[in-house]
Image (cartoon, helix red, strand yellow):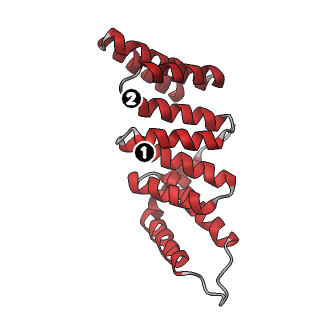
Amino acid sequence: MAKTLKFLQISLTMALLVITSSCRDAMPSAHVLSGNMSFTRGLYQKAILQYLEAEDDMSFGKDVVYYNLANVYYSLGEGDAALQTWSMAEENTDNVDILFRIAFNRGVLYYNWGRYDEAYRSFRRALKLNPADIDSKINLEGSLSRIRTNVPQNSTGVVDEEDRSSQYLLDYVQRKEADSWSGKAAAYEEEEDW
């Protein structure tokens, strides 16, 4: 139900933008909306075409088009194209929300590729942009855990200073957010799965 409401809310917002904007600006917004709908339905090739049409027609808002386009590439398994397109979105925006989402998505991509150091850096950047995001905190912890198990110690068997500072950061985040993490976990445990 919430998913339907969220979709309806986005659709109404886009419709309002289309109605209140000039005719010249309405078409690219319609292409973005159509691309979003195609993406949601799993029609990735169609979504790509609609986003590219929006890009050609838009004089502003290219950051959103590039971000959405990169997400389609990621969904198609085209990680390199996704990274390149997220970089284009990053160059065209100062919107903190988009920058956060790009950093988070990069982290997920790097993590899936087994590039845990880069995933860690991406999730850390995401947390700097949005310190309250729990998924970023969890993924940062997972990346750091993988780094610890995969990175050999130096020749003396001592953990490097950078690894130690990463551990301190993780411990700090866990202490700071322990209540909210345990509160959310308890809420999930109480739900019954039918």
Q: Mark yes or no: residue 162 visible.
A: yes
Q: Is residue 35 left or right of residue 76?
A: left
Question: What's the amino acid at mark 1?
Answer: Leu
**Residue most toward the front?**
56
**10 Å neighbourhood of mark 2: few (<14), some, or many (≥20)?**
some
Residue topped by disc 2: 61
Q: Secondary structure at mark 2?
A: loop
Rendering quarter of residue 119: bottom right
Is residue 131 visible in this depiction of the protein? no
**Mark found first going from the N terminus, 2 or 1:** 2
Counting from the top left corner in percent of width and height, residue 36 is at: 53, 24
Q: Nearer the viewer, mark 2 or mark 1?
A: 2
Looking at the image, residue 97 sits to the left or right of residue 84; the answer is left
Please, what secondary structure does the residue beneath circle 1 have?
A: helix
Is residue 165 shown left or right of residue 188?
left
Quadrant that contains the C terminus:
top right
Q: Residue at x 55, y 54 (%)?
A: 185
Q: Distance of mark 2 from mark 1, alpha carbons?
A: 14 Å
Identify residue type, mark 2. Answer: Gly
Q: Where residue 108 sits: x, y (%)?
A: 60, 49
How far across and how far down the image is residue 49, in percent? 58, 20
In the image, what residue occupies the spot 53% across and 38% down? 85
Residue 139 or residue 189, whichever sits in front: 139
Q: Is residue 31 left or right of residue 60?
A: right
For label 1, the residue is 99
Q: Nearer the viewer, residue 109 or 194?
A: 109
Q: Nearer the viewer, residue 184 or 176?
A: 176
